[in-house]
Image (cartoon, rainbow, N blue to C red):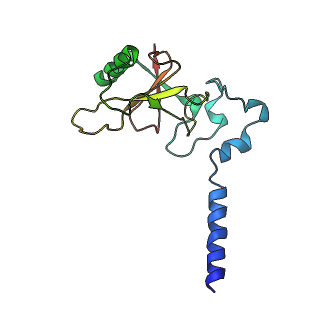
């Protein structure tokens, strides 16, 4: 009796996890010719339905540097200067595992903390920049801990 119950639990769990693949729904609808690592924002946002609460890659909003909170502008200044950063985690690799940003080789993106007034910890605000360190031409702002991004306009 216990073996039958355990087997049915394992079977159910594997069926659930099998449907939760990293890019499960996207792989089913993406043509093989579009599977290259260099995805562009020219892809229509409606081509890949995003899960609830997550924005599609082609639908990134744009925010001007003047529209950023003052703390984000300060973080951009520190990125250009190469630091010093307030947190040891600043500048660490950002994997883009949810594929909300354009796909690039591992090591392309790095994440930096944007201080939140009144909080003692790092909070949820970040800037993610791609390309060589100290370069801010391919940067994104998130105020919800990587759930959505806004491209920072030059």
Picture mark count: 0
In this picture, residue 147 sits left or right of residue 38 = left
> Residue at left 63%, top 61%?
16
x and y, in percent, of residue 20 in the image: 62, 53
- Quarter of the N terminus within the rendering: bottom right
Q: Is residue 153 above or below residue 34?
A: above
Residue placed farthest to the right in the image?
32
x and y, in percent, of residue 151 in the image: 48, 23
In this picture, residue 23 sits left or right of residue 123 = right
Pick whichever, 152 or 1, lies toward us: 1
Q: Is residue 59 above or below residue 14?
A: above
> Residue at left 73%, top 33%?
35
Residue placed farthest to the left in the image?
118
- Quarter of the C terminus within the rendering: top left
> Residue at left 53%, top 46%?
52
* Quarter occupied by residue 114: top left
Pick whichever, 138 or 63, lies toward us: 138
x and y, in percent, of residue 36 in the image: 72, 29
x and y, in percent, of residue 60 in the image: 52, 28
Q: Is residue 16 above or below residue 8?
A: above
């Amino acid at each position: 009796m216990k073996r039958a119950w355990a087997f049915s639990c394992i079977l159910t769990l594997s069926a659930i996890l099998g449907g939760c693949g990293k890019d499960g729904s996207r792989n089913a609808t993406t043509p093989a010719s579009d599977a290259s690592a260099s995805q562009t924002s020219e892809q229509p946002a409606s081509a890949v339905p995003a899960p609830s609460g997550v924005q599609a890659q082609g639908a990134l909003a744009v925010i001007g540097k003047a529209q950023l909170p003052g703390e984000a502008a300060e973080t951009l200044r520190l990125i250009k200067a190469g630091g010093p950063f307030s947190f040891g985690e600043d500048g660490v690799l950002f994997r883009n595992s949810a594929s909300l940003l354009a796909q690039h080789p591992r090591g392309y993106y790095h994440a930096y903390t944007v201080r939140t007034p009144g909080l003692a910890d790092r909070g949820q605000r970040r800037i993610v920049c791609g390309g060589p360190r100290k370069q801010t031409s391919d940067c994104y702002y998130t105020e919800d801990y990587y759930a959505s991004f806004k491209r920072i306009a030059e």
